[in-house]
Image (cartoon, rainbow, N blue to C red):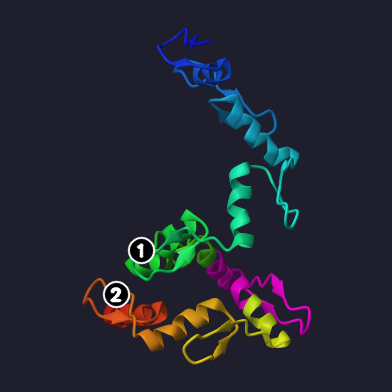
């Protein structure tokens, strides 16, 4: 049975969808969270938000039992186990499990750095790089090695360091069988075989195999 919207002309097979639609109409009093006073247009969005406060995580991974508050977050997580990476960079062909990760990665090619340090105005392409940089001002080193007690500002440096104790080099080059601690190190090495240079200077169009080399080049021409 079709339900009619008493305000407009939107129709729905389900009264529940109609109820959500009515809540978005202009002039409706917004739904408010009783914990933090944040407001929402629909009851569904309010229910999803409330899980932040209640800690409710009804969607559980059947492989590792990690739980999530939203179904879409569980679906993204499953790719960790399946190895599926549906989002591919058109420039360097690197693949990602999430669209947001691809979007951030593209900045390594474009040079876009929309995030600025409030202390020294240095700019960064990702939130994680900015957070790591801020620790150079605060002195914070939250990542501590349980083997040697060495501390790190950056989580990636910390993980790379841990492998110096285990000796693990899980990433092997298919061309020369050289092994690497991190996947990023392997990807950079592979370019020595392919001669691929995916990082281009926007000023002079010079190309580089590594983003770090492009950064050094940009710095040198800005001096």
Q: Residues within 10 Å of mark 1 (few under 14, many from 20)?
A: some
Could you say whether the residue bearing mark 2 is in a helix, strand or loop? strand
> What residue sits 68% from the left and 87% below the top?
164
Q: Residues within 10 Å of mark 2 (few under 14, many from 20)?
A: some
Residue 36 shows up from this direction: no
Q: Is residue 221 above or below residue 9?
A: below
Residue 171, x across and y down, in percent = 57, 81
Please name whichever residue, 81 or 130, is drawn nearer the observer in this view of the structure.
81
Residue 108 lies in quadrant: bottom left
- For the question of whether residue 204 can be seen, the reply is yes
Residue at horizontal 68%, vertical 41%? 52
How far apart, in angstroms, are the residues tagged by discs 1 and 2? 12 Å
Q: Residue at x 53, y 91 (%)?
A: 177
> At numbered mark 1, what does the secondary structure look like: helix, strand or loop?
loop
Tag shown at residue 170: none
Residue under label 2: 200
Q: Would residue 134 be found to the left or right of residue 161 on screen?
A: left
Q: Of all residues shown, which one is farthest toward the top? A: 6
Relative horizontal placement of residue 39, taking residue 93 as reference (left or right):
right
Between disc 1 and disc 2, whose residue precedes?
Answer: 1
Q: Is the residue 37 above or below the residue 81 in the image?
A: above
Q: Residue at x 46, y 18 (%)?
A: 25
**Residue 57, image x, y percentages:** 72, 43
Location of residue 199 in the rendering, given as x and y in whole percent from the top left corner? 33, 75
Label 1 sits on residue: 112
The boundaries of the magenta stretch are: 131-157
Residues 81 and 116: in front is 81
Q: Is residue 139 magenta?
A: yes
């Amino acid at each position: 049975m079709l339900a009619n919207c008493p305000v407009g002309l939107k129709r729905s097979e389900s009264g529940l969808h109609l109820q959500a639609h009515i809540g978005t109409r202009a002039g409706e009093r917004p739904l408010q969270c009783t914990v933090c006073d944040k407001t929402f247009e629909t009851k569904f969005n309010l229910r999803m938000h409330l899980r932040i406060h209640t800690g409710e995580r009804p969607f559980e991974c059947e492989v590792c039992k990690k739980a999530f508050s939203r179904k879409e977050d569980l679906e993204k997580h499953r790719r960790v186990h399946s190895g599926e990476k549906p989002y591919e960079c058109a420039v360097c062909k690197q693949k990602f499990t999430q669209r947001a990760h691809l979007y951030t990665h593209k900045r390594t090619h474009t040079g876009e750095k929309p995030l600025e340090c409030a202390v020294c105005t240095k700019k960064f392409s990702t939130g994680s790089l900015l957070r790591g940089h801020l620790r150079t001002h605060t002195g914070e080193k939250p990542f501590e090695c349980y083997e040697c007690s060495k501390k790190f500002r950056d989580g990636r440096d910390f993980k790379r360091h841990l492998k110096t104790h285990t000796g693990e080099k899980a990433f092997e080059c298919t061309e020369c069988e050289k092994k690497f601690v991190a996947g990023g190190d392997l990807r950079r090495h592979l370019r020595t075989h392919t001669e691929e240079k995916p990082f281009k200077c926007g000023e002079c169009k010079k190309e580089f195999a590594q983003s770090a080399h492009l950064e050094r080049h940009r710095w040198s021409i800005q001096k």
